[in-house]
Image (spheres, rainbow, N blue to C red):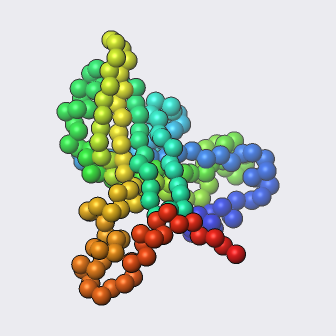
């Protein structure tokens, strides 16, 4: 079932009671130890996987969407001690180029006869899929440190390899005479007007 079908399957009277809420799920495919976490408290079983609650310990930047065929990076932030920063620097090779995915998941927030509290409604739906890239660190004073992880989606830096697969010049180098992508640059900053 797709997202639209999942949303249509939620009874209207349940939506009107305010007992359905959305939480954010994040999958990070670290090289040695993939992690699943969510922005709540405690462990959560969704889609056959266990997601660890991190509450507000990890922040996620806004996920920007536009009509253009471009995308902005997403970043994660974590307040950190000096020891955490040292550990992260030592493990940086397990991060770069690895997959990250941010999902939304609807839940029943209150228990009733048919559903326990925090029972998933429908399937998780993707907000962002990309790769983990640059890790940066900052430290000020004795106790105030932070770790930031920049992530790039599939449409970020589309005009450069390896993501430049949807450019006219790349397509023509693969298939001479192919004109299928020659208007991509024209429509990058173009807004479609629907009648």
Residue farthest to the top, as pictured:
142
Residue 165 appears at what percent x and percent y?
A: 31, 70
Which residue is more in the foreground, 67 or 58? 67
For residue 149, above or below residue 87: below
Residue farthest to the front, as pictured:
186
| Picture quarter with the C terminus | bottom right
Q: Which quarter of the figure has residue 150?
A: top left
In the visual, does 17 lie left or right of 48? right
Residue 93 appears at what percent x and percent y?
A: 20, 42
Q: Residue at x 32, y 25 (%)?
A: 138
For residue 89, above or below residue 34: above
Q: Is residue 125 visible?
A: no
Q: Residue at x 49, y 57 (%)?
A: 126
Q: Is residue 89 visible?
A: yes
Q: Residue at x 47, y 35 (%)?
A: 59
Q: Which quarter of the figure has residue 7?
A: bottom right
| Picture quarter with the N terminus | bottom right
Residue farthest to the bottom, as pictured:
177
Q: How many marks?
A: 0
In the visual, does 63 lie left or right of 133? right
Which residue is more in the foreground, 50 or 87? 87
Q: Residue at x 30, y 88 (%)?
A: 177
Which residue is more in the foreground, 144 or 157? 157
For residue 35, above or below residue 123: above
Residue 189 appears at what percent x and percent y?
A: 49, 63
Residue 3 appears at what percent x and percent y?
A: 59, 64
In the visual, does 128 lie left or right of 111? left
Which residue is more in the foreground, 76 or 56? 76
């Amino acid at each position: 079932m797709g997202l639209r079908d999942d949303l249509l399957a939620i009874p209207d009277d349940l939506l009107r009671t305010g007992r359905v809420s959305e939480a954010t799920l994040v999958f990070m495919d670290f090289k040695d130890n993939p992690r699943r976490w969510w922005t709540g408290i405690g462990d959560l079983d969704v889609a056959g996987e266990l997601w660890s609650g991190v509450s507000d310990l990890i922040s996620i930047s806004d996920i920007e969407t536009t009509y253009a065929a471009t995308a902005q990076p997403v970043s994660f932030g974590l307040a950190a001690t000096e020891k955490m920063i040292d550990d992260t620097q030592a493990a940086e090779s397990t991060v770069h180029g690895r997959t990250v995915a941010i999902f939304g998941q609807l839940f029943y927030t209150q228990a009733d006869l048919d559903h326990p509290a925090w029972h998933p409604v429908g399937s998780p739906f993707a907000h962002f899929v990309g790769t983990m890239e640059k890790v940066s660190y900052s430290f000020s004073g004795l106790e105030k440190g932070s770790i930031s992880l920049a992530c790039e989606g599939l449409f970020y830096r589309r005009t450069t390899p390896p993501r430049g697969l949807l450019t006219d010049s790349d397509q023509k180098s693969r298939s001479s005479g192919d004109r299928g992508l020659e208007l991509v640059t024209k429509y990058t900053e173009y807004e479609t007007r629907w009648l």
